[in-house]
Image (spheres, grey):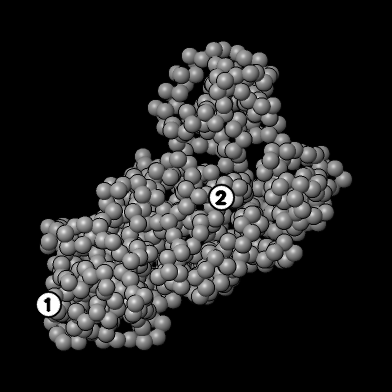
Amino acid sequence: MLKTKRIMAVVLTLCMLISLFTIVPTVQAKINDKNTTQADAETVSSSVSKVTSPSDFSWDNASVYFLLTDRFYNGNTSNDHSYGRGLDQNGQVVEAKTDAAYFHGGDFAGITTKINEGYFDSLGVNALWISAPYEQIHGYCIGGSGSNSFPHYAYHGYYALDFSQTDANFGTEEEFEKMVDTAHEHGIRIVLDIVMNHVGYNTLADMSQYGFGTVKSGWESGYYSAALNDTTYHQYIDYKSNKDDWAKWWGSSWLRAGLAGYTEGSGDLMGSQEYLPDVKTESSEIVDIPEVLKTKWTQENTLASKQAELDNYFSTTGKSKTVRNYLVFWLSQWVEKYGVDGFRCDTAKHVELDSWKALKEQCLDSLETWRKNNPTKPGADWDESFWMTGECFPHYLTYDGYYTNGGFDSMINFSFNRTGAFNDKGKGVPDVNSINETYEEYAEKLNTNDNFNVLTYLSSHDTSLCRTDLIYQGSAFQLLPGGIQIFYGDETNRPLLTDKYARAKDHALRSDMNWDSIDNDILQHWQKVGTFRNKHISVGAGSHTSLTATSGAAFARTYDKDSVSDKIVACIGAEPNTNVTITLNGAFEDGTVLRNTYDNASATVSDGKVTFNSGANGTILLEEGSQLIGDVDLDNDINVKDATLIQLYAANLNTLDETQLIAADVDNSGNVDVKDATYIQLYCANLSVDGINIGQYK
């Protein structure tokens, strides 16, 4: 289905319309020798192109880009050492033996920068899964053991301290809001990684700052020592001596832990994972705000306001003050305040389904409240419900209680990971000889049940990176039925972190995004396939039919639901630069013109077959029509950039090739002129363009 209609701000539209009528009038539709390139034109126009969501978005066809905020892009260097992270007692940057588990500087501002640059648009990404944004423990715990010990900060977002506010290393609340709004302007949903199972470890720095636990004197000399290891670190903490000291932390009503005054649990639901403090989400006990947060908020002079927010929530909802309900409130506030679209729920199997269901139900209401309270914000007019996916290793294509009783719309699919590897030898999807069998299974199980979907990945932050044949994987994986999750750098061939301390750990999988060493051949391939997927709901949500081809694996996808129809044919894994004939089995009728969006070639169906060249990457992506009218830059989208290209052409400032000229002549007059640009502007603003075939194929 064509993702063509965009709604733009009226002011922007009027300004652009005024500028249109200052351009040199009619220019005959032919290729002229002009000076400015198409790339220059796109640069000129990219800063004014703002779009909102296509009406055909579906989580069933989601392309979710998972990034660790800290490792992606540094947009604000002033927050790199918040809370003294990575600094010594004198405020100087520590010369550590490794920074594998330090904060590296990535932040909300950096994500916003890349959204504005169009990085995610060019990949066809329609949702961003970012690491938990709320405040993490300030100090470091110990990674490794003995001489291989190293400082381990909560850069990944899994060691919560305060669920109610942003972590300063990631940015301010204003920067978070700007990131969400900017994503929504580009039609991109925001999914937060959240945790209900545990909070962060106690660290020496946090214990000192907030006055909880039993810390031995002289801890500073050990904590700031380059020679510190797991043994010396824990020598400064007395875990068993004084229950009153430890009650000043979260308290035994909130947590299970191996501490004085606390109880320990066992099993999936009540055991401590990796010794992390286990939250009592199942408890019906009425509890107060944890002592550590009272102390923290008192120091920050926010206790009264945060207490008032909680009191208002509990009084208006009538809910009891249980641990679960505190967490539900804090987490749902990210939805109600900022319009967050979904959650990825960490360690789902370690929290009872009732707690997940309670979170989902509150977030459904919270998203509707945000939309009602912010009617002019981008994304406020979207109609899909709050979305939730969960991590339960090793969940596969199984429809179970997570969906029926836990409120989950999706579960992460571990079918193609390589567990415990922490390397770059991830399995990936099956090869070309069996990929159609996989596609058939996925489409049959997922797309015949409206309540069942999965989020499938190749690489992850805690299993392995798939770096084997990323051209084939870029095709086969992104054309998989159901939702898909791209791990940052899958599309750029991001390498492992080679630090010896992290090499055998999951930190190795979390290297900084390789902006300076991108494999552009791989990136461009992923971009082409990704934009095709995002444009066609049938790829992820449609039925699958295997087709025969003279080379490679060919198939058709069809979607016809809720007045939306879409159909594509594709062939992947073909011999490079080979003419491939696909037998269509009625997918498209004889005489239909098909366009290969991978290289913009066109061919006509004859005798039930069609032939295209496979190109260097053996990939053919077919949709009906030879050229989309109005899509001047051939990116499968129609927006202000296309009108700008026509303006520059009409002013003798750039050239358009023959295919582009066909697309630019939107009124079919034989001329490409100011009127064509005007019609595109009107179309983008959802104003009347009767009789003009913008968005159709010629």
Residue 442 image-quadrant placement: bottom right
Quadrant the N terminus occupies: top right
- The residue at which mark 1 appears reads as 217
- Using the rendered image of the protein, determine whether residue 18 is visible from the camera's viewpoint: yes
- Under mark 2, the amino acid is Asp
- The residue at which mark 2 appears reads as 519
Q: Position of residue 623 (x, y in %)?
A: 69, 44
Residue drawn at point x = 29 percent, y = 76 percent = 229
Residue drawn at point x = 68 percent, y = 53 percent = 558
Residue 545 image-quadrant placement: bottom right
Residue drawn at point x = 41 percent, y = 82 percent = 268
Residue 626 against residue 75 in the figure, above or below: above
Q: Position of residue 308 (x, y in %)?
A: 17, 60
- Using the rendered image of the protein, determine whether residue 406 is visible from the camera's viewpoint: no
Q: Position of residue 453 (x, y in %)?
A: 55, 64
- Under mark 1, the amino acid is Ser
Quadrant the C terminus occupies: top right
